[in-house]
Image (cartoon, helix red, strand yellow):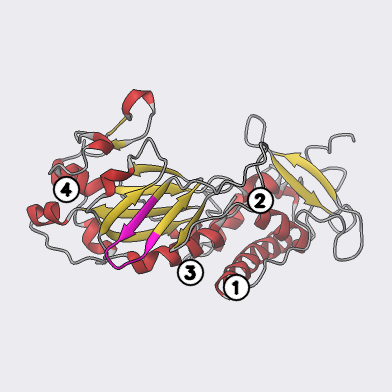
Amino acid sequence: MPEGPSVRKFHHLVSPFVGQKVVKTGGSSKKLHPASFQALWLQDAQVHGKKLFLQFDPDEEMELLGSGPQPGQGVQQKEAMNPELILGPNAQEMSAGPSGSEEPFPSGSDGPYGLGGHNLLAVAQRWLEVRFGLFGSIWVNDFSRAKKANKRGDWRDPVPRLVLHFDGGGFLAFYNCQMSWSPPPVVEPTCDILSEKFHRGQALEALRQAQPVCYTLLDQRYFSGLGNIIKNEALYRAGIHPLSLGSLLSSSSLEALVDHVVEFSSDWLRDKFQGKKQHTQIYQKQQCPSGHQVMKETFGPPGGFQRLTWWCPQCQPQLSSEGPKLLSS
C-alpha cells in the first residue's frame, strides 16, 4: 500500500499541472464519469497522510463568485470559499451517488454527471479525494505497461481509472485508485509523520496506551501516512517487539521508536526523489541484518484490519508479561 512518502511523491508529480485546464479525458471509472472533468481547471493539490486531494473548478463558476482567483492560487483563497460561509451551516451534507454506489458528491448538485452546471456548493466542495489502496499509482505523460501475462496468457496493459490531459500538453493517468468528491480537506499536520509540524508529544502519548504498539502505529489519527512498511522497519530499528504494550515500555524506548518512524520515513522520501531503491532491514526478509531468522505473523486489533508483521525474536524479544501472545505455529 502506498504510504506517506509515496503519496508525497505523487503530489510532487501532480503539482506542475496546478493552474492548467483539462482539455481531454479518458479512463474506465464508472463512478466519476471522466468526461465530467472536461474544461475544469486544476486549482490546487494537497497531500494529507496517505490521501491526495485535488481541487477542480470551472473558470466560469469562479467568475460567478466574483472571487477571480488565478489558476494555481494557494489554499487561503479556497478557505474563503468555505461552503458554510457561502450557503450556511448545512452546506457540507453529502449525497449518495447514482444507483446506490455511495460515491459522494456535493448535496444539491447534479452529481458527477452534471459538473458543468453553475452550482455554488459544487464550486466550494469540488475536491477530488484520491486513496491509493494496495496498488494505486499515478503516471505522468506515460502509461503503465504489463510486466507479465495474466491468467489467460494475455499481455494486456493495465487500464487507468482516470486520464486527464491538460492544455500544457501533458497528462496524468490514475491506476487502481479509489476516487470520490469530498469537502475541502481538513489539515492536521500535527499527526502527519512527514510534516514539519508533526507533534512528537502527541505521538508519544498515543503510544503509551495499554495496547500493542504495532496497533497504535497504524492508527492514522496519530501517525498519518504511516503504513505497514514503516511500522515494521521502525519497530525493528528500535528493538521493540510488535506486540509490546506501549504502557509497559520505557520513555526512552518510545522516544527511539518515534525517532525511527520519522527518520525512516524521511529517508524513504529522499530516496524516492533521488530515484534510489528503498532499503529495508526486516520487511519481507528471511533474515535480519544480524543473520537471525525472521518471524512473520498477522497482527491487528480485535475486529480490526490485520496486517502481516515481520520481526526478529532475538533483536526484538517479547517479555513474558506483555499482552497478546503469539499464535502457535
Please state which amino acid type lies under the numbered disc 4: Leu
Residue 252 sits above or below residue 85 on the image: below
Q: CA distance from mark 2 to mark 3?
A: 22 Å
Residue bearing mark 1:
275
Q: For numbered disc 1, what is the local secondary structure? A: loop
Q: CA distance from mark 4 to mark 3?
A: 30 Å
Residue bearing mark 4:
85
Please state which amino acid type lies under the numbered disc 2: Asn
At a point 90% along the width and 35% down the height, the residue shown is: 329
Q: Is residue 166 covered in magenta?
A: yes
At a point 81% along the width and 46% down the height, the residue shown is: 296
Marks 1 and 2 in Cβ contact (< 8 Å): no
Q: Which span of residues is magenta-colored?
A: 163-171
Residue bearing mark 2:
228
Q: CA distance from mark 1 to mark 3?
A: 23 Å
Residue 109 sits above or below residue 247 on the image: above
**Residue mark closest to the camera, 1 vs 2:** 1
Please state which amino acid type lies under the numbered disc 3: Glu
**Residue mark closest to the camera, 4 vs 1:** 1
Of callouts 4 and 1, the N-terminal one: 4
Tell me if 64 is positioned left or right of 184 in this view: left
Marks 4 and 3 in Cβ contact (< 8 Å): no
Q: CA distance from mark 1 to mark 2?
A: 22 Å
Of callouts 2 and 4, the N-terminal one: 4
Q: Position of residue 282 (x, y in %)?
A: 78, 58
Residue 4 sits above or below residue 31 on the image: below
Q: For numbered disc 2, what is the local secondary structure? A: helix
Whether residue 106 appears in this view of the structure is no
